Image (tube, rainbow, N blue to C red):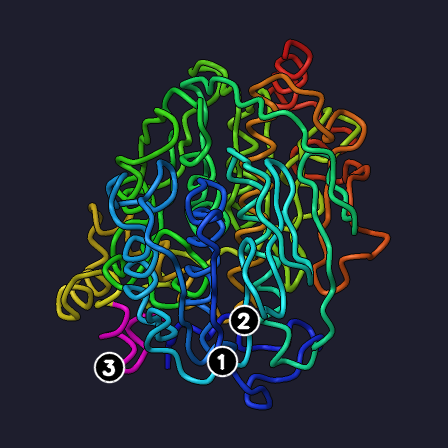
């Protein structure tokens, strides 16, 4: 039976106790009057409540205490700037239909309290600046940050603690993560300057799932960004996406991911970005196109990464998650550091014919559920599978069925980690477009963040070398595409 918590109910490779051994928490979130009047405080509150509402199995109930204030730009997609803050935070969380969410007046017994700003009696508090965010055991007002990265990172780490507590990891680990230098520290990092630059119209975000929705939300919330962002994804939203995709709720189920996310961000942003959604990935030969200047890869399939690398972007970043680890890659330089394909073996291909056969072999209940997710009737989907006729439905049904009918077990995925990966991807894109001296470069091109052990020596920026036998950039490969990449990379 599909449910919101399916993807995070596992043990993440044995790190966590099983969900049936855990006792969900009654969580209460409290924000101070001062913090609720700042854009950073409001963003931290929105993301914290959104993620907690998706943490079914870890959270039994969620209540929020928030002084009356007005919504600021770049905080709550789909809600008008100047509207009442608390409803603009609660309504998106309630529409997920996950953890019950209510104002503080309806609070049950509280077993875990999270504070934002100068409030009393919380187990942990969010702390953040423009580029850094974390958690602490001490109350304090926020730093007046105007960028979304720090507040979102802080919210992700707070939900990490809530998620760990009922699953056998009860120790509080105060820390701050600096997305500018990619370091974890117990100290307050230097508040690096807010330097958002102008995004060109030649930016592509591929993958609008868990990581991708966090990425475009962070870009939407970043002041000063201009231009058009192409967003591409061939998939539709299903129920299990709701545990981690921060722009989707029950009304999104069955709808195309790219269009649904773009529609959610039509107004109220902190910048003036325009979203250009596409169903599927661009596959035109790169020599017929203008060079793609910046690619953000948030896809979770290795065949998709190969298709993206074959677009030969001048600059490419990729973010992903695995169990309780988030990672971020800056592709290249060619021949020295990894491309998007390196160390990612291709999944076995399933033919269109086999997908149709697997669908027809499924029981009636499964076929009805799949048809409902695609927003069509089971009779119509049955007819499509039997006749193998091509058309618009192919573009929606085939990628969806490939995901749903894959015989491999689904990977553990949890919302706070996807948000962390997506926010780091957005922050790196802003640093790149602003021509900053960011941490990822031609030498240190890879970041790993192991959230189960934030002090792991593997965390931070490091070298991620090319795979010698990579299908795209491996030794001995002198394909035309690789040569084009080398040329474009050298003329950045």
Whole-number angstrom distance, CA of label 1 to CA of label 3: 43 Å
Residues shaded magenta: 358-370
Crowd tier of the residue under label 1, counting other residues whose Cα lies within 10 Å: few below 14, some 14–19, many 20 or above = some
Q: Which residue is mark 2?
A: 113
In screen coordinates, is 139 left or right of 457?
A: left
Q: Position of residue 430 (x, y in %)?
A: 55, 27
Q: Is residue 465 above or below residue 11?
A: above
How many callouts does the rendering have? 3
Label 2 secondary element: strand
N-terminal of the two: label 3 or label 2?
2
The residue carrying pointer 2 sits among few (fewer than 14), some (14 to 19) or many (20 or more) residues within 10 Å by Cα, namely many
Measured along the vertical axis of the image, is residue 440 above or below residue 1? above
Pick whichever, 388 or 115, lies toward us.
Answer: 115
Instruction: Report x, y in % for residue 107.
Output: 38, 78
Q: Nearer the viewer, mark 3 or mark 2?
A: 2
Distance, label 3 to label 2, CA atoms, is 45 Å
Q: Is residue 176 magenta?
A: no
Quadrant (top left, top right, bottom left, bottom right) of the C terminus:
top right
Name the residue that disc number 1 marks.
110
Q: Is residue 410 above or below residue 327?
A: below
Q: Residue at x 32, y 27 (%)?
A: 274
**Looking at the rendering, which quadrant does residue 108 occupy?**
bottom left
At numbered mark 1, what does the secondary structure look like: helix, strand or loop?
A: loop
Residue under the image location 63 percent in, 59 percent down: 322
Q: Mark 3 highlights which residue?
A: 364
Q: Nearer the viewer, residue 386 or 346?
A: 346
- Mark positioned earlier in the residue sequence (1 or 3): 1
CB atoms at circles 2 and 1 under 8 Å apart?
A: yes
Q: Is residue 121 left or right of residue 54?
A: right
Determine which quarter of the picture holds residue 460: top right
The alpha-carbon separation of the residues under discs 2 and 1 comes to 7 Å
Q: Nearer the viewer, mark 1 or mark 3?
A: 1
């Amino acid at each position: 039976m599909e449910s919101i918590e399916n993807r995070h109910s596992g043990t993440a490779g044995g790190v966590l106790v099983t969900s049936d051994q855990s006792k969900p928490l009654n969580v209460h979130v409290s924000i101070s009057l001062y913090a609720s009047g700042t854009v950073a405080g409001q963003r931290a509150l929105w993301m914290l409540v959104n993620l907690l509402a998706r943490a079914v199995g870890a959270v039994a109930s969620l209540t929020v205490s928030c002084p009356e204030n007005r919504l600021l730009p770049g905080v709550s997609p789909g809600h008008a700037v100047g509207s009442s803050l608390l409803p603009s935070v609660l309504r998106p969380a309630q529409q997920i239909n996950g953890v019950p969410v209510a104002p503080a007046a309806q609070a049950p017994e509280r077993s875990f309290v999270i504070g934002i700003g100068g409030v009393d009696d919380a187990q942990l508090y969010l702390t953040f600046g423009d580029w850094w965010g974390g958690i602490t055991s001490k109350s304090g007002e926020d730093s007046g940050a105007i960028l979304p990265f720090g507040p979102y990172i802080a919210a992700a780490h707070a939900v990490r603690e809530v998620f760990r507590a009922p699953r056998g990891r009860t120790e509080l680990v105060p820390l701050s993560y600096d997305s500018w230098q990619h370091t974890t520290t117990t100290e307050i990092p230097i508040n690096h300057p807010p330097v958002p630059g102008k995004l060109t119209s030649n930016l592509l975000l591929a993958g609008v799932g868990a990581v991708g929705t966090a990425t475009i939300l962070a870009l939407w919330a970043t002041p000063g960004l201009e231009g058009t962002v192409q967003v591409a994804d061939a998939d539709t939203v299903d129920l299990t996406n709701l545990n981690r995709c921060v722009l989707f709720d029950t009304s999104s189920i069955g709808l195309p991911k790219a269009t649904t996310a773009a529609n959610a961000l039509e107004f109220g942003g902190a910048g003036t970005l325009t979203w250009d959604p596409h169903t599927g990935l661009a596959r035109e030969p790169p020599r017929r196109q203008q060079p793609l200047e910046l690619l953000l890869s948030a896809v979770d399939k290795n065949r998709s990464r190969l298709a993206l690398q074959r677009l030969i972007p001048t600059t490419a970043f990729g973010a992903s998650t695995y169990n309780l680890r988030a990672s971020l890659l800056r592709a290249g330089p060619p021949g020295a550091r990894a491309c998007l394909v390196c160390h990612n073996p291709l999944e076995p291909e399933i033919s269109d014919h086999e997908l149709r056969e697997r669908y027809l072999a499924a029981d009636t209940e499964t076929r009805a559920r799949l048809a409902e997710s695609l927003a069509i009737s089971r009779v119509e989907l049955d007819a499509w599978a039997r006749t193998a006729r091509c058309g618009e439905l192919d573009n929606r049904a085939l990628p969806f069925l490939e995901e749903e009918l894959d015989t491999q077990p689904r990977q553990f995925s949890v919302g706070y980690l996807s948000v962390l990966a997506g926010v780091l991807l957005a922050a790196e894109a802003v640093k790149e477009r602003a021509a900053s001296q960011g941490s990822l470069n031609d030498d240190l091109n890879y970041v790993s963040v192991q959230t189960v052990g934030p002090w792991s020596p593997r965390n931070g920026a490091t070298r991620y070398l090319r795979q010698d036998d990579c299908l795209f950039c491996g030794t001995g490969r002198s394909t035309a595409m690789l040569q084009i990449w080398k040329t474009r990379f050298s003329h950045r």
